[in-house]
Image (cartoon, helix red, strand yellow):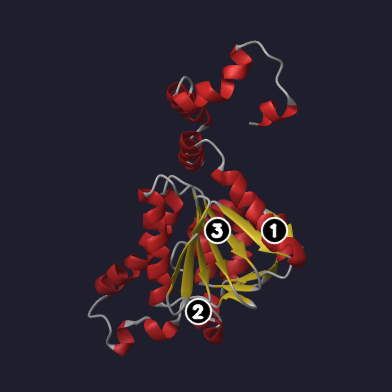
């Protein structure tokens, strides 16, 4: 197991999984430049290293994160930080790029949320492929109380995941959502009792790490593309991608027992 520490987060690598654990509990795990740098480093390593199969984002303590640490972020022209709105938007874009990379890297990204997850934490979660929650997890977008809106993909990605009905509840009304409601909304995939949460997360990421790499990458790309396509083009896209996967070495290895005429077991059918 490889292990790396900085002041606000730690990064571990084990069995094909790279894990970034936010641990800045004195500041409610507010996202600092050091945490952002750790996430950038991990997703870059994930993309570049064929031995890494999955990225997990986790946290320690009663807060997953209180959101962006405002002490480190110049936010407005009023404080003299930016000469123009264009300069402000250019700086803002730097944070967008991290979430864009989480969303588009061709390997699965999992967020495991315990405790309170606010603001940019919700936006980061929406950019991940999978969101697992402990039963004590809560989610809220408090930006409306500061007279702004979520601006790092929070509204766009949230609306795509849960629809305008619930996106208005969170981003327009600023309402908090507990884990059971987040599951009902479709924001999180799974809710586990606190005492079983870590075991369930570990089992899920191990499952992802063992899946065929090219097919997993293709599924991520095709699903995100299909969300923006009409039904006819969805079907065309599926066939085009499978024409490359069907007959590739991994497919041939995993289906050899069927071609030999042996009766598949239950495990065979699920692989």
Residue at left offset 62%, top offset 18%: 257
Q: Which one is nearer the viewer's eye here, 27 or 6? A: 6
Residue 95, percent from left and from top: 37, 67
At 38% from the left and 50% from the top, the residue drawn is 47
Q: Which mark is residue 199?
A: 1
Residue 190 visible in the shown view = yes
The residue lying toward the viewer, choosing from 82 and 147, is 82
Q: Residue 63, image x and y in percent? A: 61, 77
Q: Which mark is residue 30?
A: 2
Task: Give the secondary structure at mark 3.
Answer: helix
In the displayed structure, 266 sits above or below 152; it is above
Q: How many numbered marks does the figure carry?
A: 3
The reply to whether the C-beta atoms of the residues labelled 3 and 2 are less than 8 Å apart is no
The quarter in which the C terminus is drawn is top right
First in residue order: circle 1 vs circle 2: 2
User: What residue is disc 3 on?
Assistant: 158
Q: Nearer the viewer, residue 82 or 218?
A: 218
Q: Which mark is residue 77?
A: none
Give the structural element (helix, strand or loop) at label 2: loop
Label 3 vs label 1, nearer the camera = 1
- Cα distance between the residues tagged 3 and 2: 21 Å
Q: Residue placed at 64% from the left, 55% from the top? A: 202
**How many C-alpha atoms fall within 10 Å of the one at disc 1: few (<14), some, or many (≥20)?**
few
Distance from the alpha carbon under mark 1 to that under mark 2: 26 Å
Can you name the residue that lies furthest to the left here? 83
**Inter-mark Cα distance, 3 to 1:** 27 Å
Mark nearest the camera among 1 and 2 is: 1
**Would you call the spot at circle 2 few (<14 residues within 10 Å), some (14-19), or many (20 or more)?**
many
Q: Measured from the top left, where is residue 75 in percent x and y?
A: 37, 81
């Amino acid at each position: 197991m490889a292990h790396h520490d900085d002041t606000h987060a730690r990064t571990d690598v084990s069995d094909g999984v790279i894990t970034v654990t936010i641990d800045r509990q004195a500041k409610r795990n507010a996202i600092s430049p050091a945490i952002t740098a750790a996430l950038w480093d991990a997703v870059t390593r994930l993309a570049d290293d064929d031995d890494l199969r999955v990225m997990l984002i986790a946290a320690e303590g009663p807060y997953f994160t209180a959101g962006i640490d405002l002490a480190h972020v110049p936010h407005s022209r009023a404080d003299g930080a930016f000469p123009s709105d264009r300069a402000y938007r250019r700086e803002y874009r730097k944070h967008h790029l991290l979430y864009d990379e989480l969303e588009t890297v061709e390997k699965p990204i999992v967020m495991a949320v315990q405790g309170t997850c606010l603001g940019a934490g919700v936006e980061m979660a929406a950019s991940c492929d999978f969101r697992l929650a402990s039963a004590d997890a809560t989610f809220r977008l408090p930006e409306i109380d500061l007279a702004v809106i979520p601006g790092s993909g929070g509204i766009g990605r949230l609306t795509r995941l849960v629809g305008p009905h619930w996106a208005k509840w969170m981003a327009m009304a600023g309402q908090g959502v507990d884990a059971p409601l987040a599951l009902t909304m479709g924001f999180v995939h799974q809710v586990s009792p606190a005492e079983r949460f870590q075991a369930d997360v570990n089992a899920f990421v191990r499952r992802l790490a063992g899946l065929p790499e090219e097919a997993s990458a293709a599924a991520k790309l095709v699903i995100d593309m299909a969300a923006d396509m009409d039904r006819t083009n969805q079907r065309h896209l599926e066939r085009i991608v499978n024409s490359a996967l069907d007959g590739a070495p991994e497919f041939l290895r995993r289906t050899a027992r069927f071609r030999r005429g042996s009766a598949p077991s239950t495990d065979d059918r699920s692989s």
